[in-house]
Amino acid sequence: MKVIITGASKGIGRGIATYLAMDGMETGLLARSASALEDVTQSIEEQGGACHAVPCDLRDPDATEQSVQEIVRLMGGVDALINNAGVVIRKDIFELTLEEWRAMVDTNINGVFYATRAVLPYMREQQAGRIINISSISGKLPLPGGSGYAASKFAVTGLSLSLFQELRDHGIIVSTVYPGSVDSASHRHEAEADPSWKVAPEDVGRLCRDILNTAPGTVLSEVEIRPLRRPPKA
């Protein structure tokens, strides 16, 4: 299976890309940082996985379309897209700046739309494909102290559920994943806090593998993945 992952250079995206590559899938990695992409590509290849990487600013629709085209060319096709790239800024409405609001909207919402739009011509032509959108528990539940981030992830949820209805008759399956607390640097509010109770990025990758391997004719439409353990008491 040939899978494109956005935001694949670090955190959840790197965990997904590494897990899928180690499971035998051919992965196409998109992220802004060329050096970070080079690092994860080297790591995957040293472990025997197959991957291709193209730097891409998902906030730019033309750049996104060109990067997706290049990844598809390198892989010789595409079977799935995992929209993972996201910006997490935990501030309330009084503290959040306009620049921070725009950063989350540009990446968390527009980036998902641009990448999906870029990959759909290939999937529609072959009448088959899978799209996994990584939302967040914050895309289902209110997030006091992070209203801007919650708004962006509620948008991802709404887009995903609508795309499921729009694309199913073309053989394209859309699934939405809602991670809870994940051990990712971008999600850490306190750098020194113990993250061992959280979901590992690779566990999100394992879930994506299971979704991609769902039997034909069935859909895992929405899936939450949360830590079993509670956060340690302060």
Image: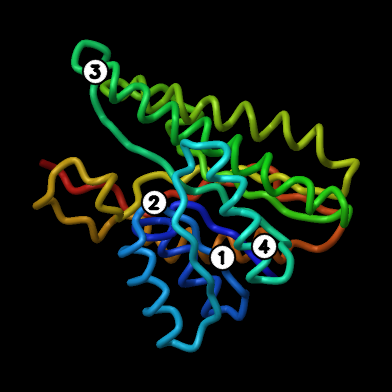
Q: Which amino acid does label 1 sit on?
A: Gly
Q: Is mark 1 on a helix, strand or loop?
A: strand
Q: Answer with the quarter of the image where residue 97 lies.
A: top left
Question: How crowded is the residue under tag 2: few (<14 C-alpha within 10 Å), some, or many (20+)?
Answer: some
Circle 1 or circle 4, nearest the eye: 4
Report crowding for label 1: few under 14, some 14 to 19, many 20 or more residues within 10 A (C-alpha).
many
| Alpha carbon distance from label 1 to label 3 | 33 Å
What's the amino acid at mark 4? Answer: Val
Identify whether 103 is placed above or below 3. above
Q: What whole-number distance in Å separates the C-alpha atoms at marks 1 and 2?
A: 14 Å
- The picture places residue 118, in percent across and down from the top left corner, at 67, 44
**In this rendering, position of residue 197 left or right of residue 128:** left
Q: Distance between the residues labelled 1 and 4?
A: 8 Å
Residue drawn 37% across the image and 79% down it: 43
Q: Residue 28 bears which disc, if any?
A: 1
Give coordinates of residue 197: x percent, y percent. 27, 57
Q: Mark 4 points at which residue?
A: 72
Residue at the spot 63% in from the left edge and 70% down from the top edge: 74
- Residue bearing the label numbered 3: 97
Q: Residue under label 2, please give it.
A: 32
Are the residues flagged by discs 1 and 3 in contact, CB closer than 8 Å?
A: no
Which image quadrant: the C terminus? top left
Amino acid carrying label 2: it is Arg
In the image, what residue occupies the spot 40% across and 56% down? 12
Amino acid at dot 3: Thr
Quadrant for the N terminus, please. Answer: bottom right
The reply to whether dot 1 and dot 4 touch (C-beta < 8 Å) is: yes
Looking at the rendered image, the disc whose residue lies closer to the viewer, 1 or 2, is 2
The tag earlier along the polypeptide, 3 or 4, is 4
